[in-house]
Image (tube, rainbow, N blue to C red):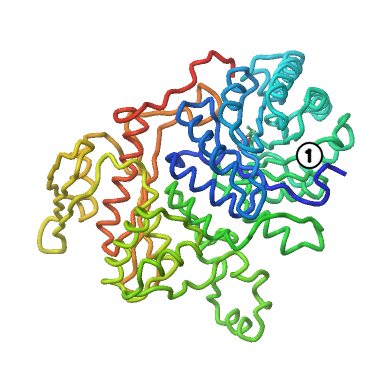
Amino acid sequence: MTPSGNRVIFFDTTLRDGEQSPGATMTSAEKLEVARGLARMGVDVIEAGFPAASPDDLEAVRKIADEVGNSAEGNAAPIICGLARCSKNDIDKAWEAVKPAARPRIHTFLATSDIHMEYKLKMTREQVVERVREMVTYARSLCGDIEFSPEDAGRSEPEFLYKVLGVAIECGATTLNIPDTVGYTMPEEFGKLISGIIEQTPGIEKCVVSVHCHNDLGLATANTMAGLRAGARQAEVTINGIGERAGNTALEEVVMVLQTREPIFKLTHNIDTTQIVKMSKLISNYTGITVQPNKAIVGANAFAHEAGIHQDGMLKNQMTYEIMRPESVGATLTKLVLGKHSGKHALRTRLESLGYELDDQELLKMFDRFKMLADKKKMITDSDLEALVSDELYQPTELYSLDGLQVACGTMGMPTATVRLCDPDGGMHVQACVGTGPVDAAFKAISSIVGFSNSLQEFVVHAVTEGIDALGEVTVRLQGEGETQNVGLQPDQDQPRTFGGYGADTDIVVASAKAYLSALNKMLVASGKFGPPEKASTEAIVY
Ligand code: KIV
Ligand code: ZN
């Protein structure tokens, strides 16, 4: 029996493995908001980032450790974890970032598969064992809670794994995480790997065994469930399953499997499942990575019943075609909450019940937006309020802001947009451009003022509620031309940098311009042209 008994520890890595996926770059304010939401949801461990990646990453993790790692809203404050390669510099940076938390954790990792050791690390098995011994001991001298991961465990030789894990335990590791880094294993195989580790590793009963699966073959959730059945008690997951390549195991899938098939698993957890849909939306707004409509649990169609035969069955008994209730994941029908005559107090109360604690200045901003929307739209729902909060309060540093936009379009002339932007020093810039349509023309005008080469990778428009007066939400993903970043964990894995942006307005051209500008602002901050540049770690390290 592991130290956690029958309780599954939810370890969320949306802010680390999730944020590593192309385009998922989030601002510090967004990361903090995500961490608050995860804590509210009852996540046990928040992996807040990879502090050695850049000074900005370190600062964002430190802020989360300080603010979220010490707030106990009903639950105990979550453990705040920072990732570190097996190097002194990484471990020092992770410790510097997480130590303000009431319950800090350092997560260090080193690859153990032959292919990684030979080609990537260029280290022998003996050298790997020695590095683990040295670095886990060092990490434990700083922090009482140490997680160790043998990277690419899914393709590592089991006997060697037992040996490396045994050394990590001897040196003070408290959680042993088994990653299927490349999403290669099958559920039965992965389950056997976990039982083998539990049976064969000396001292394992003192530690929590964790599973961390990638979704390259679409088996991440199945493998995670197999790991839990075999005795693992920590699941590493991300919201919406975002992450490297095909992503990580989705939090919402694991928790709903545990809940819906409880008689099979007989395992408990601390997740408030009614927060699932809200968190899913928050992540897709912040990252610009939209959720496919048929995605399990959080897709727009996950609870839709279109076929007549299904609808007939549902009317007779919901259990005919529904294995979980939409309310259990927070996917209730949008409610009419406020109208034109509602006051500030009613708005604050409603926002608080949705989990948003605003200061007076934020409330004033929200109230102005709310009144403007109420002039155009009679019924203001929870979803509208959530979209306004994302659009108004959780935007990146506004280097350039949209001061005015006018478009002419239709069949009688060339689509033209005139844009007025306010620059970081308060200067006004006006530009008019023609394009293939009003959105294209607006993007061209914005781009020519900002003067930062980029290409549009993705553009998605979606209506927040039903009805012709609905707010339109737009998410975009931009790629900076010539800009690369090392989002991954190896120095030679530079990828083109992409940035997500979000905007909401009843006018979808305005929403599009806001989303485009929000992604461009992120891109400018990250490029270092404004504000502090994001520097990569300069430490010479072999992997
Ligand atoms: O997938 C992986 O191997 C990882 C490790 C850092 C745990 O993300
Ligand atoms: Zn991973």
Question: In the rendering, at what x and y percent does residue 162 appear?
Answer: 83, 28
Question: In the rendering, at what x and y percent does residue 369 appear?
Answer: 30, 61
Is 121 in front, or is 507? Answer: 507
Quarter that holds the N terminus = top right
Q: Which residue is mark 1?
A: 208
Relative horizontal placement of residue 277, taking residue 170 as reference (left or right): left
Q: Judge whether 372 appears above or below 216 on screen.
A: below
For ligand 1, give the image quadrant: top right
Residue found at the far left of this picture = 413
Q: Judge whether 271 appears above or below 118 on screen.
A: below
Residue type of the residue flagged with mark 1: Val
Q: Is mark 1 within 8 Å of ligand 1?
A: no
Relative horizontal placement of residue 174, taking residue 522 as reference (left or right): right
Question: In the rendering, at what x and y percent does residue 307 appear?
Answer: 55, 77
Quarter that holds the C terminus = top right
Can residue 16 be seen in the rendering of this structure?
Answer: no
Can residue 421 be seen in the rendering of this structure?
Answer: yes
Question: In the rendering, at what x and y percent does residue 75 appear?
Answer: 66, 52
Q: Residue at x 65, y 79 (%)?
A: 318
Q: Judge whether 480 appears above or below 278 on screen.
A: above
Q: Residue at x 16, y 48 (%)?
A: 420
Q: Residue at x 81, y 27 (%)?
A: 169
Q: How many marks?
A: 1
- SS assignment at label 1: strand
Q: Quadrant of residue 385?
A: bottom left
Is 66 in front, or is 85? Answer: 66
Is 101 in front, or is 397? Answer: 101
Relative horizontal placement of residue 397, taking residue 120 as reference (left or right): left
CA neighbours of label 1 inside 10 A, class few (<14), some (14 to 19), many (20+): many
